[in-house]
Image (tube, grey):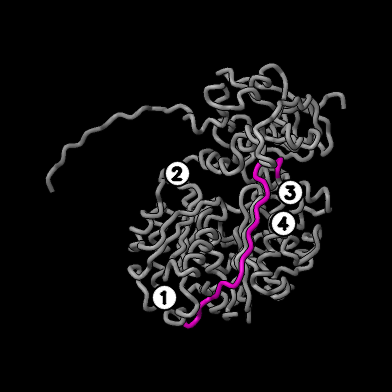
Amino acid sequence: MSMVKFEKIKRPEKIGLPFMLDFYPLQDEKNTRISQFFKSLKEGHLTTTKCKECGKVLWPPRIMCPECLSESLEWVDLGVEGELYAFTEIRLGAPLGFVEDVPFCVGIVKIGSLLISARIDDAKYEDLKIGDKVNLKIVELPDSRVFYRFSKDKEQ
Amino acid sequence: MKQVAIVAGGEAKAGRRAASWRDLVQEAGKALFEDVDNLSPKDVDSIFVGAAQPERFAFLSYVAPLVAEYIGVTPRKVIARTELACVSGQAAIRYAWNCVATGMSDIAVAIGVEKMYQPDMAEAQTTMTCVLDREWDGINCFSAPPIFAVTAQRHMYEFGTTEEQMALVSVKNHHYSSLNPIAHLRKEVTVEAVLKSPVVAPPLKLFDCCPMTDGSAGVILVRAEDAKKYTDTPMYLIGSGQYAIGNVINNLASLAEWVPLKLAAKEAWRTAKITKDDVDIAEVHDCFTISEIMEYEGLGFCETGKGGQFIEDGEPYIGGKVAVNPSGGIMGCGHPLGATSIYHTFEILKQFRGDVDKGRYVEGAEIGIQHSLSGAANLHSILVCSRELR
């Protein structure tokens, strides 16, 4: 057996969260045609698109109505209150970037005709029940992107 | 259109395997061609590879030619990867079936593979979170356990289903998987053990959930008229149904009732010219205990909302109304996404051959169905298999 040359090579110690594993989408007008949704969110409003032709309220927001193919859509405000339709708490198996939040609640919030999934903040699983009133909450990421969550209405 | 038969199957041992993605597919390929007479990889003209997320789990795209190369197949009619999350394997079988039925292919392989174990569990969970609408549901950490947890919560709320009833599904399927040598989990569990297992996402505990599993399985399809050239015991594909409604949680038909499953079942019975009462074996998608309970209902084995009672009465055991998951199901065998449907289709063939442990053999079975679902249970897919040509 002849001796071969052996050399150690370098690789980066750590690679940051790659873009495609960062769950939050790019929100500005350079990257999406629904940037208005995120702009409104920055101003404190949860909105979605409604078709002017057939009247359907669409979630998530679109650039085209799948019911009638119309591109004639308008932004509508969904208000700041919802009702808890279903919920659970993530105790095991959270994805990257969320592991340090465990345990945390997630749920489905009924707003008018829509059922919107969201993080449910400021409550333990035991504090919640189906039908609870929840309020809109907006979170801002370090890079100034935003997203919506809900928290339990403390008035109840 | 020609009638089509499955003449062989092969599978890798499922589990947390000391094997790579491509090792698994080679194991299944070898077993597949050893299961059939008068047929070698060189005779296969078409191949469909069920693979849900090889980009994330194995850092591979363009996997169909890779698999063909590894198992010695030279595709010259049709080759494709099929991706439909947890239904990827059944999608592969359906494509192969279509190609053989139309005459586009003479001999087609459907083979599925997934390698789900990786060093970082959080990364695997991240991968699976891409299956739901990642920008609107996945972002809120709705991966498989949370969506099925809220489904279970609504089912309990609307119909009075209990955690004990859900646990009974786990007890049944672990019992059967303990008798299945290829299964991932081969230990029996008790109701108490299920209820006391760590909570993943309430009301779901660890033993309400299928495990993360590595595995691969394949089948060979030919025209029914040619089947006896290759085996004395072919299995005939006689019907199917598939239905999807919506994708994002907001656009599901309902949470506590699986409408697309009912519609897929209706189509499966219609195309196979059978009724639900003709089904002897149902290999269904028990990714979570609540899933199987809702499948009893959706397939019409019991009324909507009565699925918990159905398992309490012992009806889905062998000897009951219908044998549900005598393989041990996904709960016991594991759920390597792209391979799952194919494992359970091969299970029905093994049952027809009498090639299973006595303790989980469904004697005299004539009709078996393989059901898979994907996403937030917005898509359901059913194959109807028959021992005899009908």
Question: In this figure, which residue is indicated by the disc labeled 4?
Answer: B167
Q: Give the label, 4 or 3, closer to the camera.
A: 3
Image position of B60 (left or right of A65): left
The residues bearing labels 3 and 2 have C-alpha atoms spaced at a distance of: 30 Å
Whether residue B22 is visible here, answered yes or no, is yes
Q: Earlier in the sequence, mark 4 or mark 2?
A: 2
Q: Are marks 3 and 1 in contact (CB under 8 Å)?
A: no
Task: Examine the image and state in which quarter residue B319 appears.
Answer: bottom right
Kindly state the secondary structure of the residue where label 2 is placed. helix
Q: Position of residue B217 (x, y in %)?
A: 47, 62
Q: Are marks 4 and 2 in contact (CB under 8 Å)?
A: no
Bounds of the magenta segment: B232-251
Of all chains, the one bearing label 2 is B
Image position of B312 (left or right of B260): right
Q: Are marks 4 and 2 on the same chain?
A: yes
Question: In this figure, which residue is indicated by the disc labeled 1?
Answer: B36
Amino acid found under the numbered disc labelled 1: Val
Amino acid found under the numbered disc labelled 4: Ala
Task: Examine the image and state in which quarter residue B146 appears.
Answer: top right
Amino acid found under the numbered disc labelled 2: Glu
Question: In this figure, which residue is indicated by the disc labeled 2?
Answer: B55
Q: Nearer the viewer, residue B38 or B390?
A: B390
Disc 3: CA contacts within 10 A as few (<14), some (14-19) or many (>=20):
some
- Name the disc covering residue B253, or none: 3
The residues bearing labels 1 and 4 have C-alpha atoms spaced at a distance of: 39 Å
Amino acid found under the numbered disc labelled 3: Ala
Going 37% across and 78% down the picture, which residue do you hit? B38
Of all chains, the one bearing label 4 is B
